[in-house]
Amino acid sequence: MPWVVREAVRDINRAVGRRWHAIDPLLPDPATLPAGCGEPLVVTGDNGRPAGLGICVHQSIPPQSLNQTWGAADRFTLVPRLPGQDVEAPADLLLAQWRDHLAGIAAARGPDTSASVVWPSLDITGVQALLRHGLQPITVIAARTRPNLPLSVPRGAFGTTIRAAGPADEEQVLDFELRLIRYDMHFGGPVWRGDTARLVRDEIRGSLAGSAAWTWLAERNGRAVGLLVAQPPQGSGWIAGMTGRSPAAYLQTMFVDAQERGTGIGAALVRNLHARLDGMGVAVTLLHHSQVNPLSAPFWYRMGYRPLWTSWEARPASALR
């Protein structure tokens, strides 16, 4: 990294942190910039010094990994650091540099690739630049903070019971998880792979065999009609850095049978989890949902969540303009 960039990184990160916290108090301090697949991308200010930075991170996901189901096999992610009140112009310059960078990488030209930027959802000044470069909002990380209210018994859904799932429920949990993946594929997120079903089953089997499985089924008349899977703070370290609040938990899966939607089962499952997390003193709960799923955003925002980060993506990566 050139010396002038090294000298400026700390100041830029601090400025970005101040900007983020002014936009959204749930955002974290900017993390240390990761190692990239090339030299840092630098936006130069009028004084000739760096006024913004970007790192391109390349992840090549192995075929035997369940992670391949959640996106392209080769993922190129821009990590931007743009201070200032209005970042549209520097974002435009940074994205143009990133496009040119990807054009020189052979692995970025394939069909099973993506180019993405994870952008603070409440930061509206860069949206026009993202759109101009062919990026689309695909996935949202939403957050719910623990309310400052007395704890209460969660309200259930009429005629429905909620119970912890165990090893004997493997087939039912698998059915719900695979149906959810197939549904979410309509919105540009998951990719069905040859090993998806097997890898999902392996993950479920390991989770349900644990002594503290965070998986619940909703049942009506003896039939499973809904599923919720969560990760407590000790299992959510991989995403906890996306917020400045701690401890953080992660709501991994929520699915209700199509014939039972609108009956309160989903809300009852989520309230059951919230009561558990609030009782533990968990400060914030995070989840992913599709930006364009017509069911997700209205439901989650009724349940107290709101957007924190938005993943903007071009797929394949060569679609970046």
Image (cartoon, rainbow, N blue to C red):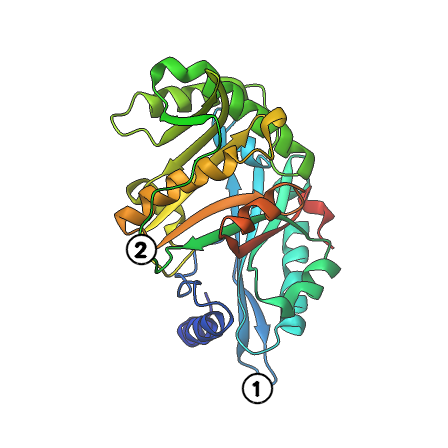
Q: Nearer the viewer, residue 12 or 162?
A: 162
Residue 46 visible, this angle: yes
Vertical position of residue 247 compared to residue 110: above or below: below
Quarter of the picture containing the N terminus is: bottom left
Kindly report the distance in space between the C-alpha atoms of the residues bearing marks 1 and 2.
Answer: 54 Å
In the picture, measured across the screen, residue 318 lies left or right of residue 153, that is right
Residue 296: x and y, percent? 60, 42
Vertical position of residue 126 compared to residue 291: above or below: below
Q: What numbered label is drawn on residue 150?
A: 2
Vertical position of residue 7 compared to residue 171: above or below: below
Type of residue at label 1?
Asn
Residue 92: x and y, percent? 68, 67
| Other-residue count near label 2 (Cα within 10 Å), few / some / many at <14 / 14–19 / ≥20 | few
Residue extending farthest left: 211
Type of residue at label 2?
Pro
Q: What numbered label is drawn on residue 107?
A: none
Q: Nearer the viewer, residue 261 or 111?
A: 261
Q: Nearer the viewer, residue 141 or 7?
A: 141
Which comes sooner in the sequence, label 1 or label 2? 1
Residue at left offset 59%, top offset 72%:
43
| Residue 85 found in image quarter | bottom right
Instruction: State the SS at label 2.
Output: loop
Quarter of the picture containing the C terminus is: bottom right
In the picture, measured across the screen, residue 231 lies left or right of residue 107, that is left
Q: Which residue is mark 1?
A: 47
- Circles 1 and 2, Cβ within 8 Å, touching? The answer is no
Residue 143: x and y, percent? 46, 53
| Residue 229 found in image quarter | top left
Residue at left offset 38%, top offset 40%:
273
